[in-house]
Image (cartoon, grey):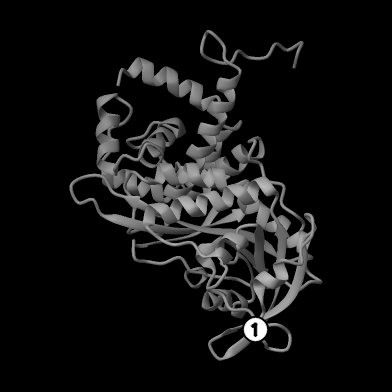
Amino acid sequence: MDPAVVDEEWALVASLLPEGWEDLARETKALRRARGIDGAATLLRLILLHAGVGLSLRSTVARARVVGLAAISDVALHLRLRDCGPWLEELTSSMLKRSRYALSVPVLPAGMRLRAVDATTVQEPGATGTSWRVHYTLALPELRCDFFEVTGVDGGETYRRIPVRKGDVILGDRGYCQREGVRHVIEAGGAAIVRLNLNNFPLLDRQGRKFGLLSHLRQLTDHQPREWTVQFDAGADRYEAQLCAVRRSAVAAERARSRILRRASRNGHVVQPETLEGAGYIFVLSTLSSQEASAVAVLDLYRVRWQIELAFKRMKSLLNAGHVPKYSDRSARAWIQGKLLTVLLIEQLLDEARLFSPWGFALPMPQSLA
């Protein structure tokens, strides 16, 4: 809490931000007037205290007042946060381009946009211990939050929560493996790529007969992916899709089976042989046609989810503490974007730490070397 130390440490963090980040605050109208906040640096420090550290709005302004950072009310900070979404999105996008998590997204057909959907629980601090679930989608490769919804912990993961536009290609993990949810995406003009569970998404072959998933997976040889045209029923309608699959390596399959057995042991469950056999494969359902995306392309698109899974997990660990601004769409979206920016700053700090210097910060590069 020593103001001199806090200011010095902030200077190191600010050096990791993209060039022109302060001017961008005014360009995006995050900072329209300086009343109570003397500039973009102060505003971003307050946001990172709230969203990154996980302090409530009231705790944030109290700490800011103690260290002499700003004298502002929690209500005023909440109003400021509402206007910061576009600024934080631009900062996140710029940070991501130079991050080791910069995504190389496979080329999609013209007019299609890639989005990833996820959800996480949030435990509010204090005596109430209220739990919430934050559902959100990220536009890729920018890692820009373009939708969120806050529910109670009983609010399940489903594509049906997501507003879908024509041309959206939405990536989901096994939590979103539900026929009605996939139907919602199709009917809205989008496409779903979702990791399947072994038993809870019944598939049919082209003749409308039961599709034997494991019997088809056994046909896979080496590590060559394959695809099959399948159908599924949702409500009174039948839809066509592509099942894309690849055999896991022996090491990856053994790790997957070990995780299943450990989880079953903790929960006192008996693992079925089919479950262990299915762990030897990755199988994904795609509602894109085979002309729009081959099996290799679909699996490559799904791989993008795996590329950012580590960043997601780190973000989730940050999300597990703090106050969710539940009553304002704009402030909650800015809060999530602040979490994403914090993740990228942490990753940048870790990268800097690998090139340790005894004096504790990076020196400017000499002009002759630049």
- Camera-nearest residue between 77 and 134: 134
Q: Is residue 76 above or below residue 43?
A: below
- Camera-nearest residue between 22 and 164: 164
Q: Horizontal placement of 6 versus 260: left or right? A: left
- Residue 22 at least partly seen: no
Q: Which residue is mark 1?
A: 210
- Residue 349 at least partly seen: yes
Q: Is residue 253 above or below residue 72?
A: below
Which quadrant: the C terminus? top right
Q: Horizontal placement of 60 versus 28: left or right? A: left
Q: Residue at x 41, y 38 (%)?
A: 52
Q: Residue at x 44, y 46 (%)?
A: 316
Q: Residue at x 66, y 59 (%)?
A: 281
Q: Position of residue 286 (x, y in %)?
A: 68, 69
Amino acid at dot 1:
Lys
Q: Position of residue 329 (x, y in %)?
A: 40, 59
10 Å crowding of disc 1: few (<14), some (14-19), many (20+): some
Q: Secondary structure at mark 1?
A: loop
Res 218 quadrant in image:
bottom right
Res 114 quadrant in image:
bottom right
